[in-house]
Image (tube, rainbow, N blue to C red):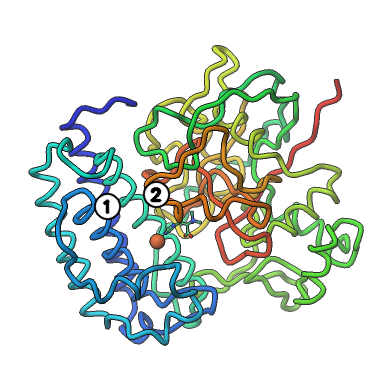
């Protein structure tokens, strides 16, 4: 899989671009125009900004950088540059209205398909033209997840539907497993569409540790709430305690209590909190406090990746917990097939050799680690993708949520956000250092 020939690459690029566009179309056609231009939360762009930004990035990196074409509409570049305008300021920009944004993205796509059909990927300006197609398909899918978050924040009746995950038999395996200590190869140098921050592969020594076999459930998190977790300063970091006090946080985002029952709002529907589902919409501070209350801690990013990729039989790092095969529906809850996580313990076919489940899909998992470059990191193709975010203000999330498409999901994939953020599809699992 690491050495695709030109035809395989063309096929994969085409399929990935088409899949992404189908999803973008769904997310931008299930509501009327006023809902596309409105700002549903100051944390998010109007949906119509994401739509034209998707087209603009595709024009920049495929038509201009790979194809050497002239800018189609140079006057709009600034509007859709994420670094020029913070999300909160985007509604007041002279954005393309919905019909024009759709038309622009479609025009770009038409030309990209011509470029892809004819390209030999050699005479291009970008060092690795092939990579650019994968990067752009992943970029669109990442914005599709962003748009799904906007839909979740939107008030009003349900606009999206999807079948519930398959009901799973209650999980009866062990609550945690021991991951042996020793060297582990983290990151990748060979995965063709891995982004700059996942590179290069490098060896790390890892001390033995225990890790939860499933993400932390609503039932477990409720026990923390009911034990006064949000009123007990000692479970929280000083920053976390200040944050939850200042904003009066008492439960995950989108939860409220009514007549002694916990309810949650999800995509316009209010329902009771389901005990065996992974907890969703918690910030890093909440995940960290829960772990301390439970006598445990968040796994480091290295521990998380070792649990997901290390094959104890061979010592090799694999692409996914289940092996090297691309994700299929029986492995993991990915790609917005469902509008929420599956019960903890689902997808036995996706478990790691040591029996850790749901590392991929369902909920993004907060780790203890800051977002930092790997030794030998090189920014590619631009510093603003990852490099400008490195540092202690961002925490790493791993594994991907139900809203992540398989093209943007790998055992090496790294996401990052501020520790206060919880509108994202975030949950966590816990770990503890093994006694030696
Ligand atoms: C990797 C999800 C943090 O949404 O800010 C989208 C992905 N980068 N456009 C983000 C991204 C440029 C990025 N995250
Ligand atoms: Fe973007």
Residue 320 appears in the figure: yes
Residue 135 on image: x %, y %: 34, 47
Q: Which residue shows up at 61% across the image and 48% down it? A: 371
Residue 233, located in which quarter of the rendered image? bottom right
Which of the marked residues, 1 or 2, is nearer the chain's N terminus?
A: 1
| Residue 44 point in image, percent of width and height | 49, 73
Tell which of 14 and 126 is nearer to you.
Answer: 126
Crowding at mark 2 (Cα within 10 Å: few <14, some 14-19, many 20+): many
Residue 433 appears left or right of 24:
right
How many numbered discs? 2
The quarter of the rendering in which ligand 2 is drawn is bottom left
Residue under circle 1? 19
Would you say 206 lies left or right of 309 here? right
Is the residue under label 2 in contact with that under label 1 (CB below 8 Å)? yes
Callout 2: CB less than 8 Å from ligand 1: no
- Label 1 crowd bin: few (<14), some (14–19), many (20+), radius 10 Å: some
Residue that extends furthest to the top in the rendered view of this protein: 314
**Going 83% across and 57% down the picture, which residue do you hit?**
237
Residue under label 2: 405
């Amino acid at each position: 899989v690491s050495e695709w020939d030109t035809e395989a690459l063309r096929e994969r690029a085409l399929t990935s671009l088409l899949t992404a566009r189908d999803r973008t179309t769904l997310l931008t056609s299930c509501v009327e125009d006023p809902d596309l231009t409105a700002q549903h939360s100051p944390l998010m762009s109007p949906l119509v900004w994401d739509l034209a930004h998707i087209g603009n990035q595709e024009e920049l990196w495929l038509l201009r950088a790979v194809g050497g074409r002239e800018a189609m509409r140079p006057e709009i570049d600034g509007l859709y540059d994420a670094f020029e305008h913070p999300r909160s300021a985007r509604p007041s920009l002279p954005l393309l209205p919905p019909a024009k944004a759709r038309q622009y993205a479609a025009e770009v796509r038409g030309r990209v398909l011509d470029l892809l059909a004819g390209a030999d990927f050699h005479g291009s300006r970008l060092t690795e033209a092939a990579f650019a197609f994968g990067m752009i398909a992943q970029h669109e899918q990442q914005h599709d997840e962003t748009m799904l978050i906007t839909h979740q924040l939107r008030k009003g009746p349900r606009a999206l539907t999807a079948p519930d995950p398959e009901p799973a038999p209650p999980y009866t395996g062990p609550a945690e497993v021991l991951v042996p200590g020793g060297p582990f190869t983290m990151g990748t140098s060979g995965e063709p569409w891995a982004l700059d921050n996942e590179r290069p592969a490098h060896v790390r020594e890892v001390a033995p540790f225990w890790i939860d076999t499933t993400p932390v459930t609503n039932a477990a998190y409720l026990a923390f709430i009911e034990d006064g977790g949000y009123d007990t300063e000692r479970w929280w970091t000083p920053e976390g305690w200040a944050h939850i006090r200042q904003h009066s946080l008492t439960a995950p985002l989108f939860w409220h209590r009514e007549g002694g029952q916990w309810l949650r709002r999800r995509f316009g529907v209010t329902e009771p909190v389901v005990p065996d589902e992974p907890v969703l919409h918690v910030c890093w501070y909440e995940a960290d406090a829960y772990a301390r209350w439970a006598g445990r801690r968040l796994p480091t990013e290295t521990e998380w990746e070792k649990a997901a990729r290390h094959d104890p039989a061979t010592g090799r790092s694999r692409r996914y917990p289940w092996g090297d095969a691309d994700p299929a529906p029986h492995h993991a809850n990915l790609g917005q097939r469902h509008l929420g996580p599956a019960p903890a313990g689902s997808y036995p076919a996706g478990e790691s050799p040591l029996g850790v489940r749901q590392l991929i899909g369902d909920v993004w998992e907060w780790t203890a680690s800051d977002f930092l470059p790997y030794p030998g990191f090189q920014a590619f193709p631009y510093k603003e993708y990852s490099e400008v975010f490195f540092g202690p203000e961002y925490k790493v999330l791993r594994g991907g949520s139900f809203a992540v498409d398989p093209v943007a999901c790998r055992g090496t994939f790294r996401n990052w956000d501020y520790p206060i953020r919880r509108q994202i599809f975030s949950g966590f699992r816990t770990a503890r250092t093994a006694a030696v």
